Image (cartoon, grey):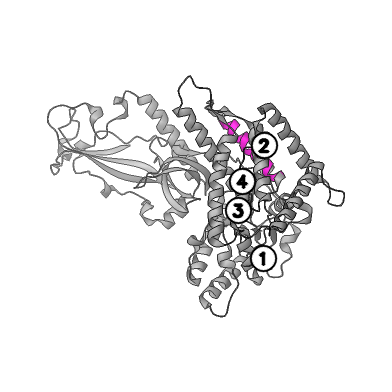
Amino acid sequence: MVVNVAGGREPLVYKANKAEEQHSTPVNGFVVDCISLGSNGSSFVPNLERFSIRKFHGRQPISSLLLYPLKFDPNADTLRNGFLEGGRNFSQVASSPFCHKRAAGKTVDEPSISLDAEVVVDMTLAMNTRSEWRLDSSITRDDFTRNDRREVLERPWYEHLMIMRPYVHAFVLRSRQWVTIRSEDLQEVIFRNSFDDLVLPDNHKTTVQALVTTHEKGRSPLSSSPEQPSIGSVLDLVQGKGSGLVILLHGPPGVGKTSTAECVADDTKRPLFPITCGDIGETAADVEHNLQSHFQLAHKWGCVLLLDEADIFLAKRTRSDLRHNAVTSVFLRSLEYYAGILFLTTNRVGVIDPAFRSRIQMSLFYPQLSLDVTCKLYEKFIRRAKAEQMSQGYYAFKIKEKEILKFGKKHFRTLEKNSYETWNGRQIRNAFQTAIALAEHQSMTQSPEDPQPTLGKEQFEAVARGFMQFDEYLSKTLGATDADMAKREGWRNDGYMMGAGNPAVPVVPMAMPQPARHVQKQAVAMKYHSDDDSDSETDSDEESDRDVREARAGKSGSADKGDSEMDREEFYEYMKWKRQRSEHK
């Protein structure tokens, strides 16, 4: 909104009283004082901005100037509606203490970055953190040019929504940084992750949901419904101590630890606030300050706080490293007084200091993926790929679902039989992404008369060969597999399986690197092409469905009653292979 102008030519209409005329200092060009409405975190305040239009000779289209009246724009109605909508968005967001949104667009800050992430808009906290964002609470008469009353041509007009600032300050949860984004780029958060899609060991899902649901202190402040406090929350003898919910998730990489925290956040409709060791610091003073800062933010916004690779701060104290001992002590004390929800994940649970056991409300072990879980993950990613094709309406390739499932089962058995580590969830996801990229590339490079590309066994075998070469290189270089090294160093035991959650397939112990003749035999065994693979897709699909059903049915039976026929045959085959291997030695 324009509140004052100065300079330029003489007004065409002169109505000022001669007695009140005051001669102003000549201005080279044209100066326009404008006002907009911003927020200081607690109220809406005016913000003054000054624009200068350089002097020019002759005539120019008014729309070519830096700014001009809205009525002269050919799209005035569209712009007016856009300003009104932007004002409504700004007023709604800025008037709330904070709000959880998704930002999709570029930041206003320099340098500008593209965002597609969840943010928390908190104007008060943003301006307390970044002093340069603060606005003056008032504008005085001296802020305007009023030397010549003839230059004030129009009385101020206020369309409050139209003159509200089009951007807000927000905290990006993933990168842990404050940014300025346009209010029109804010969207409602769509909570996609669900516990129904999460493949967890038995009872883990129920335990986590029960703990989070009954946790009162970490309840989101946005919730206004009255809730009866849990009886367990008042059992501590010292008030304010031990009121938080701290859950430790441990196990090998890629088995669903981080995904559990993500599903908890989406299931409870809370922001997920992930932090890393780099955000906390190295010295005891830095750790204490940064932990308190992150804890305050997470508790104020009702976040689910996630600290990945927490073993760095949970490691056992020693007599020689006093600096690390101080960091561990600070972390111990901070955990006791945190009142929110905190997930700690680690793949080196064996190094954790014993004092943390009493500070952690629940510890959950995540074993390696079984055949049944692996098949479920393949099915999940296939469904997602098909759903994405349907939503885009673009089918660059055909998905051979049953062929992919058959590959997944055969690949799992081959790796397990040859004492290699089977794929974890993250590796399966990466394999799907790479295989899809190969199929899409084939679609883009082939000629129009060629048949439609397919996503099936061929792409996944190419990915598997790359993974296998890397695993063999590491195994020969380090002298052991990752699981063997983890057990040797006392970090974790990947071979341990919970009794209630044992997979149908027997657990094969990881082996040390073998002589060259055995490596050569394994390389032959790792070839994926066989007589079975030459069957038609229909036969392959039928076998795949039958095998998956049998594998899942075998999981429900106890070891005493015997496994399914398929599992017994596999076990006998494995024992036969083991005897042959012993004879060669």
Label 1 vs 4, first from the N-terminus: 1
Which residue is painted at 20% across and 31% down in the image?
15
Q: CA distance from mark 4 to mark 2?
A: 20 Å
Residue 577 covered by magenta stretch: no
Residue, x 69% and y 31% (percent of image)? 540
Where does label 2 land, which residue?
A: 406
> Start and end of the magenta stretch?
372-388
Lateral position of residue 269 relative to residue 58, left or right: right
Counting residues from the N terminus, which is met first, the one under dot 1 or under dot 3?
1
Amino acid bearing label 2: Lys
Badge 1 is on which residue? 242
Q: CA distance from mark 3 to mark 2?
A: 25 Å
Q: Earlier in the sequence, mark 4 or mark 3?
A: 3
Residue depth check, mark 1 versus mark 4: number of the one nearer the observer: 4
For label 4, the residue is 524
Q: Indicate which label's residue lies in the foreground, 4 or 2.
A: 4
**In the image as oriented, which residue stretches furthest toward the right?**
561
Which quadrant holds the C terminus?
bottom right
User: Gap between marks 1 and 4, in whole Å?
Assistant: 57 Å
- Toward the top, the furthest residue is 449
Q: Depth-wise, is mark 1 or mark 3 nearer the camera?
A: 3
Q: Secondary structure at mark 4?
A: helix
Q: Is residue 210 visible?
A: no
Q: Are marks 4 and 2 in contact (CB under 8 Å)?
A: no
